[in-house]
Image (cartoon, helix red, strand yellow):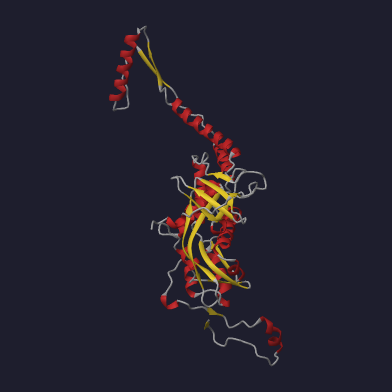
Amino acid sequence: MGLFDKLFKRSPKQVKFAPSLDGWSPVFGMFGDSIYCSDVVQQAIKCIVDEMKKLNPLHIRYIGNDPSPVRDSTVQSVLNNPNPLMTTSEFLEKTMWLLMLNYNAFIIPTYYVWTDEKTGQERRYYEALYPIRPSQVDFIEDATGKLYVKFWFWNGDQTTLPYDDVIHLKVNYSVNDYMGGNEAGQPDHEALLKTLELNKTLLDGVAKAMKASYAVNGVFKYNTIMDDGRMEAALAEFEKKLQNNQSGFLPIDLKTDFTPLEHKSELVDEPTLKFIDEKILRNWGVPLDVLTGDYSKETYESFYQKTLEPLIKSLSEAFTKKLFTQREKAYGNRVEFFPKDLIFMSINQKIEMVNLLAPTGAVFENEKRAIFGLMPLPELEGKRYMSLNWIDANNADQYQVGKDTKVEVIDEEKQEV
C-alpha cells in the first residue's frame, strides 16, 4: 500500500452539488498566487507562519473549568507526529502557508474505527494528519443530504470524503457559504495589488535613476575639429589610459579637456518607502518592527492579539470539531494550541509570575528552571512545592475566629504535592 493510498476514496453514489445560499455553484478552483512574488508579502506571511509553527498542540480534557492534558490518546499521538513526512512544526508551517496563501487549508485525518468493549462505543484510532493542496474543490451532497467534499489534485487524482472527516481552516470567511475569501472562494487582493504596483513602480524608478546617474561619468573635450574616425580613435586611446592608470593621475595634452560629472541620484525618500511597506503589511496585520525583528514587548503583544490569536482560536476549534465525536466533546475533550512559553515576559515579569504561582503549588520545580532557560534536573522530576500559609477558602472565616472545626492546613514548611 502506498503512503497516500488512504487519502483517496470513491465518490458516493447519487450525488449533486451542495446547495448555496447565494446561488453560486460550490466548485472552487485553487489557487491564486499573483501577489506572492512581492518580497514584502512573502516576508509578512513568513512572520505569521514562523510564529504559528512554535505552537504546542495538546489534547485537553476539561472537567468543569479545570483543563487536564491527555497524553495517551491517539489524537495526541498524531499531534506529536502528524505523518511520516513531517514533524509537528513542519506540519503547522505547511498548513499555515496554505491557509495564508489561499485563505483556505484542508487537512485529511486517516484513521480506523474500533469498538470499546467496556462502553460499546465506536472510537477512532488516528494514524496521520495530511495537509493537502488540491487544484479544485467541489462541495456535493448525497441523496440523504450528507455533505461531501471532492478534491481534485494537480496530477489528475481525485478523492471524495465526508466533510465531517476533513479539517477545513478558513480566513476572511464572509460572503461565501463554504470557503474563505471572496465569492469564488479565493483571496480578494484587488486593493492590495494597487499598492504592490505602486511599490514596484517606485523601486523600478529607483533602479533606473541609479543606472542613469552612472551612465555618463564625464565630458572629454578636444580643442580642435576632428572627424568621426579620429574622434573614435582618440576616445579609445583615452579609455586605454583610464584602464592602465595606477597612480590616480591621468595625463592629457594641451588639446584636450576632461570635465567630470557629479553623480546625484534622486531616490525616493525613506518615509515614502516606509509608508508603502507599512501599507502592504497592514493587510496581514504585521507591524514593520516585527518584520525587521526590532520590536518591543508591547509591539509583539499587539501583533499576537491582533493577528496570531484569532488564527490560534480558529485552529483549536477546527481540530476539535473534526477530531472528536459529539460524545467526546460533551465530555470536555478539546484540541488547544498553546503559544510559546511566556512569550511576552521580561526577566522581572517571569520572577514575579513564579513568586505568585509557586506558593500555590501551581508550578513544578523543573518548570521554574525552564522559565529561566535552565535545563531540567532528573532529581526534580515531578516535584511541586507549596506554601504552608494556605487553607480552604470555605473554612477561612471559621479558622479566623478560632472555631473548633476541621481545617486542612499543611504543617511542614514545604511539602510535595
Residue 5 position, x and y percent, is 42, 56
Along the line of sight, the residue nearer the viewer: 16 or 291: 16
In the rendered image, is residue 183 in sight?
Answer: yes
Callout count: 0
Residue at far bottom of view: 404
Along the line of sight, the residue nearer the viewer: 142 or 238: 142
Residue 305 position, x and y percent, is 60, 56
Residue at the spot x=51%, y=78% of the render? 384
Q: Is residue 271 above or below residue 328?
A: above
Residue at the spot x=57%, y=71% of the render? 61
Along the line of sight, the residue nearer the viewer: 247 or 15: 15
Residue 307 position, x and y percent, is 58, 52
Residue 151 position, x and y percent, is 51, 49
The quarter holding residue 214 reads: top left
Left or right, 302 with respect to 373, comes to right
Left or right, 388 with respect to 127, comes to right
In the rendered image, is residue 293 in sight?
Answer: no
The quarter holding residue 60 reads: bottom right
Q: In this view, does 333 lie above or below 211?
A: below
Q: Which quarter of the figure is the N terminus placed in?
A: bottom left
Residue at the spot x=47%, y=31% of the render? 207
